[in-house]
Image: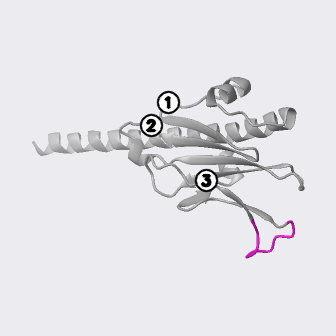
Amino acid sequence: MVISALLLGMGMAGSIAKAQTQADADQKDALKAVAQMMEGQRTYYQKNAAFRATVSNIQQDFGISLPTSFDYAVRTTTEAAYSYVIPAQSSKVGQLNAYVGAAFLTPSQNPKITTIICMNLQPGQIRPSDPQLVLGTLVANPTGRLVQCGDASIEVKASMVNE
């Protein structure tokens, strides 16, 4: 009986480890998807002077694979495009973090479009706060502009996107 309990415990530990490994893979795929969506928006704007307003058009135009463990949305303005990647309803929803990517038009600067990707600090289906393009008054910023993540989210560095 003790042996069967130990074996059962090891089986559960293996299942938990496998589920965590899958959640990590899903998280990495979602990060890749939001990064590709932001680069797609940058490329599309440079060619067409407008942002793409629907996920399906971005996906089709740039051949982006979107993991099914997340839901996707896009919001555009005349000066920015936001791409949201939020965990879909599943048993892994509490293990996955949501992302928002933003592409900001900065006409008087080079580059003309600045992008940022932010990840929620807390896992779950909470939509991340929108990143902002703000005047940089509290930091050394000779260009006068700064892109930063919204509340309760952190910037994902480019090196993490390319791992």
Q: Amino acid at mark 2?
A: Ala
| Residue range of the region highlighted in magenta in the rendering | 135-143
Number of marks: 3
Number of other residues with Cα within 10 Å of mark 3, as a class: few under 14, some 14 to 19, many 20 or more: many
Marks 2 and 3, how far apart at CA: 19 Å
Q: Amino acid at mark 3?
A: Asp
Residue under the point 50% across and 58% down:
121
Left or right: 106 with respect to 65? right
Residue under the point 21% across and 40% down:
8
Q: Earlier in the sequence, mark 1 or mark 3?
A: 1
Q: How is the image coloured?
A: one colour
Query: As displayed, is residue 153 above or below residue 127?
Result: below
Residue under the point 79% across and 33% down:
44
Left or right: 38 with respect to 50? left
Pointer 3: what residue? 130
Marks 1 and 3, how far apart at CA: 23 Å
Q: Position of residue 48 (x, y in %)?
A: 84, 32
Dominant SS in magenta: loop
Q: Which mark is residue 68?
A: 1
Verify whether residue 103 appears in magenta: no
Pointer 2: what residue? 88
